[in-house]
Amino acid sequence: MPSGSTPPIGSTPLHGAANGTGDLDERAIRWMRQRMASSGVGVIGDKARLDADLAGSITDAGLGLDDAWQMFSEVIAPQNIGLDSERFLAFIPLSPSVAGIWMDAICGTANFSAESWLEGAGAVAAENQVIELLVRTAGLPPGAAGCFMSGGSIGNLSALAVGRDQAAGKRVVVVADTAHASIDNALHILGLQSLVVPTGPDCRLTGHAIRAAVGHRDDIAIVVAAGGSTNAGVIDDLAGCAEVAADLGAWFHVDGAYGLTAMLLPEMRERYAGIERADSFIVDPHKWMFAPAGSCALVYRQPWLARQTHTQHGPYIDVLRTDDHAYNPCDLGYQLTRRASGLPVWFAMALHGLDAHRDAIRHGLVLAQRMAAALDACAATELIMQPELGVVLFRRTGWHRDEWARWAATLLRDQVAFVAPTTYRGEPVGRLVFMHPRTPLAIVDELMASLTG
């Protein structure tokens, strides 16, 4: 075709049976199967090398399948850390189930529009089954409901916006000194002010500490607690925090992005006493519910209050208001267009059942306890606190920031694990997070050898 001419309608290589992707589907499926079978620890990519290797990869004519796939499979894919690796023990790991991964791929293919009942009733109905499970487990009253969002940060932002709108002009939010960074960011965006309450050596926010910090103030809009803090994996005094929030007439929000999933275990449920009093909470299924990245379940005690804050209006949006509009996820959080990120969660649970998911959660708890016991028994290491969930904080005699950095670099170089040391009360310390159901028990011995060899 002559340069600059217009192709016939329907002749685009981007879509349809005549697309120019060749055997890309077979290559992709092979790659996905290999990845699901085993994900390595990975590497930290070198910017100069990546920039050089990818320079000129976007051209007017395109590279063609072989060269484009080679760029992906040999340049891009290997230059990443494997967040889904069973040896990823830093930050908060991901461990998506095989069923969840395949359903996520299906969602990407189908592009289910999970913003409204009008467009995606089937997908939304399935997501609502997961929300209902969380509502029942938490002990919220009938009528409690919620939706899925793309991550915990936007889930927290959405919930706190509703709390702000119910505060009658109050603008102060109680947060722990251990609160996740997304809380502070959300408060900044919403024009709210934080009242930071110090936690004790156990990193736990308590009702007593809140009362002491608040004193006689009458401007508290929201109380935020954690259902498993990110840095130390500690469950706050939810019952005490709920009691204070009720006395202050404040909204009670629980950031359970990482740890609240463990309430699915009967033996752990009592540790979350008080969650039934929350006005809102979040859980990130891409953490301990073994979903692919990009999912957050946001739950409200009174969802109609969320609709007052988040329902969007416009000439082309109001068509979403049908007889079933009460089920519109877009009316419950600050997000309109959204993939059906709850559908992979529902599918894996429907396929394998809750008991299989509970056993997978327990594996992380068992590993954390084994690691803690090994650290306790070693003369060169000191456990900072007994792990409540899957996070282990500890000291190594004589080690400071540089030694921790070298330890992490050596483990990555040797492909033993990816770890990220942290701080405790300003002190550099070791941090390990156990969540992946396939992390071998033998990793405890490997890590101890790295700390004492």
Image (cartoon, rainbow, N blue to C red):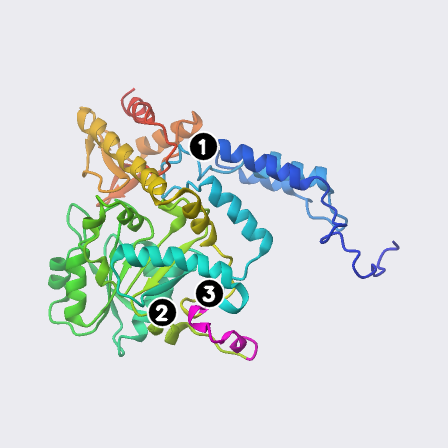
Disc 2: CA contacts within 10 A as few (<14), some (14-19) or many (>=20): some
User: Which structural element holds mark 3?
Assistant: loop
- The residue sitting at 29% across, 57% down in the picture is 136
- Quadrant in which residue 196 is drawn: bottom left
Of mark 1 and mark 3, the one earlier in the sequence is 1
Q: Which of the two residues, 154 or 428, is positioned nearer the viewer here?
A: 154
Disc ID at residue 190: 2
Q: Which residue is mark 1?
A: 41
Res 97 quadrant in image: top left
| Residue 84 is at least partly visible in this image | yes
Name the kind of residue labelled 2 in the image. Answer: Leu
| Relative to 293, residue 132 above or below | below
In the image, residue 260 lies at what x, y percent? 29, 51
Residue range in magenta is 315-330
- Number of numbered tags placed on the structure image: 3
Q: Nearer the viewer, residue 112 or 184?
A: 112
Q: CA distance from mark 2 to mark 1?
A: 38 Å
Q: Which residue is mark 3?
A: 335
- Residue 191 drawn at (x, y percent): 34, 71
Tell me the mark number nearer the camera, choosing from 2 and 1.
1
Mark-to-mark CA distance, 2 and 3: 15 Å
Look at label 3 and name its amino acid: Gln
From the viewer's perspective, tell me whether residue 2 is left or right of residue 450.
right
Q: Secondary structure at mark 2?
A: helix
Relative vertical location of residue 342 with respect to residue 324 in this rendering, above or below: above
